[in-house]
Image: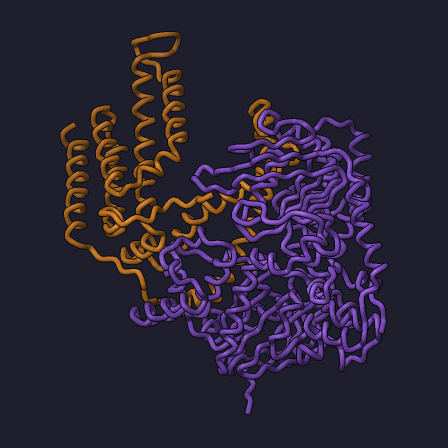
Amino acid sequence: MDMFLYLDNDTFLHRLDPRTKMLVMLASFVVALMFYSLPTLLGLTLVIVLYGMAGKTLGNLKRIRFILLMIALFSVVLWSLTYGGPTKILGPISTEGILYGIVIGMKFDIMIISGMIFLSSTKVEEISLGLVKLRLPYRGAFAFATAIRMVPMIVATSFTIAQAQKSRGLDLDSGNLLERAKKYVPLLIPTIISVIRGTNVFAMALESKGFGYSEDRTNYLQISIKKGDYAILFLALIVITVSTYFKFVVI
Amino acid sequence: MSENIIELKNLSFRYKDQKEGKALSDVNLTIDKGEFVLVMGPSGAGKSTMAKCLNGLVPRFNRGEYEGETIVNGNIAKDTNVSTMAKEIGLVFQDFESQLFSTNTKLEIAFGPENFQVPRDEIHKRILEMFELVDLKGMENRQPSTLSGGEKQRLAIGSVLSTYPKIVCMDEPTTDLDPLGKIGIFNIASKLHADEDFTLIIIEHETEESLNADRLILMQEGKILRDGKPRDVLREIEVMDNLGIMSLQIPKYFKEKFGVEKADLPLTPEEGVEQFTALGCAFDEQQYKQLLDADAKREESYGEELIHVEGLEHVYSNGNKALNGMDFSVRDGEFVAILGHNGSGKTTMVKHFNGLLTPTAGKVTVKGFDTTSTSIFEIGKHVGYVFQNPDHQIFSDTVYEEIAFSPKIRGCSEEEIDIRVKEALASVGMSGFEEEDPFSMTKGQRQRIAVASVLSARPEVIILDEPTTGLDYKEQKQMMDLVKKLNQQGHTIIMITHTMWVVSEYAHKVAVIKDGKMMMYGKTRDVFSKDEELAKSFLKTPHIVNMSNRLGQTILSVDELKRCTKEG
């Protein structure tokens, strides 16, 4: 089972410099966090999805559609029950509450989708190289990239472990919330142990390949800001500036 | 003219958290430039510790009391950074999953040279060279996670060789690999050995592959026990038997049967056949017939059909077709070994037997229950599954709780649980360990605890996925004697394995799987008589079986051959 997020295609999006893609992600976060208007967020979603389509990354979004849906649902239920508002529909539920729930859910989903597109179209090496070019020390950038890479490994391990425990009779699907939480202990401990054992070898292998030999290193991978990058960077900057202007000056 | 490239002087080491003894005690060793050295020994003999001393991981990464000196190509290892030592010596580990960390195979190989600021053009040249050397051409842009185990390990070797070290040390590189993967590693080893300046050190369990090395070192309890030419060391059957590593079967047979002098002991099946004929020996047909009769009688003694598989196909959600129409059946009391290379579909198949997977097409029934309509909880009462890595299932603080987990979850009473835990522990020979912490045990012990924790559910069928992987010979033998005992007590055994001697000495029946299809199936003796057909599935019979096949009959163990020999 393939647990890795990066999709190895050769598209416009993949060829963009990682720094450009980071700025685009930042721009989407800025807009998503600043505005509460449904049309704006819908517009933003459309732009992001089109942007993702350019990199053929939507397949990955399918994989997390359940999570996206759950976040949206959870937000709608939570806010419609707690928001209050004048136009009551049933009990504490109001139109305003439902709308607010939708808006908040969308904000989260937009950020997740945007991050997902970034990770689907950018190699971890590119991310760390991009961060280095942004003056982050190499060790820090490498640690960050490693953290991203660890997630799918941990998921894959926990998958095997879940099978092993199910074979012993562990039934994860019944019982109330507390009982079910307790049932995850047999999964959690072996996962943690396996990850710790794995990282130990990982650290030794790193050092044995000369990691940290000197402050400078060559980069086999090359990144550079090209024409397309300038265009996208320019657009992203405009979006950030204009939306900040509207948020703090106009409104 | 030879020159020392590695020198260990009075080297001792004790890990910080080591309770007793020393990992290495007063080791003196010199290795010449260009030598190919094999190191063998039981678990805990200090082999890995010695390897880690060479590039300074001991004591710089694993801390402890360090005495003496390790000099590698003029560098004092303990006073040099591990990353600096990486220029001199490359280290390859057993766990190939954790050694690889790049997005594609090229970047994996580039990682080392990048650290040493090798110019980009030069890195590109080296990448091409490495793909050639480790036989991964055509996989230049693959993600490491999509490679097979053997390919991953070869990539790991390439990623170490790309910094052009003059020495490479591999710590059990083939332990987790299937037979095909092992062959790949040994091929690389012989290519490297062809370079006269290149020094190669390999820590291994496989005795049968050791004849190609220049030198064989046996270690025990942190000391060097024997050091010499493989042909000489391998003839010391008693030393190896006492040490707990597998002695070669051919010299063992000739020594025990005829008391052949050490210097004249044959080592390979070819040499064995020659000596057998020279001694004027022949098969004792009557004894051999008894073996065949015993096989046939056992075949008749099996009970009702427990697992029935018909036209089984399985397609994974990513579209991979792992099983392609399989028919199979297991009867009560059988001991079946399932062989096949990684990715052949073995594990996919057996996961159907306890309901972890359900067929895409075809049908699997367990004791008459269709697995598609029966829950895994229900099937689990009849079929227990011991996973390959015991660490994937152990989670409790004490052995008792670990083993009690299964009966507890199935609603047994306190007394019943107590009875079952005691019984399971006794079965695996670990009574008295109830209050121990499973995490502080050796891998062999943890494997036993994992078996016990499956036994406590009292299943009729026990599936074991590579129960001997990562264990040394002595532990393997203990494990297999345990499995044999369980079989004799009435449990039906289905075991996935790569270890051929285990199959020949223990399994009643063998199924060989390749590309999702059953290639061969039958009594062990029948399947193992077909050396050529097995080779098509990248399988090699153990030496003793191979020798007897050459002589015209199929014998499964040294003891059997001793019985069936008519002296000339």
Residue in view at x 80 percent, y 34 percent: B418
Residue in view at x 34 percent, y 36 percent: A61
Quadrant of the drawing holding the N terminus of chain B: bottom right
Q: How is the image coloured?
A: by chain
Residue in view at x 30 percent, y 9 percent: A87
Foreground of the two, B116 or A60: A60
Indicate left or right for A232 with B352 as reference.
left
* Residue B283 makes an appearance in the image: yes
Q: Colour of chain B?
A: purple
**Horizontal and vertical percent position of residue B445:** 72, 51
**Horizontal and vertical percent position of residue B393:** 63, 42
Residue B533, by quadrant, is bottom right
Residue in view at x 78 percent, y 52 percent: B481
Residue B434, by quadrant, is top right
Looking at the picture, does residue B259 appear above or below residue B447?
below
Foreground of the two, A126 or B492: B492
**Horizontal and vertical percent position of residue B10:** 66, 79
Q: Colour of chain A?
A: orange
* Residue A166 makes an appearance in the image: no
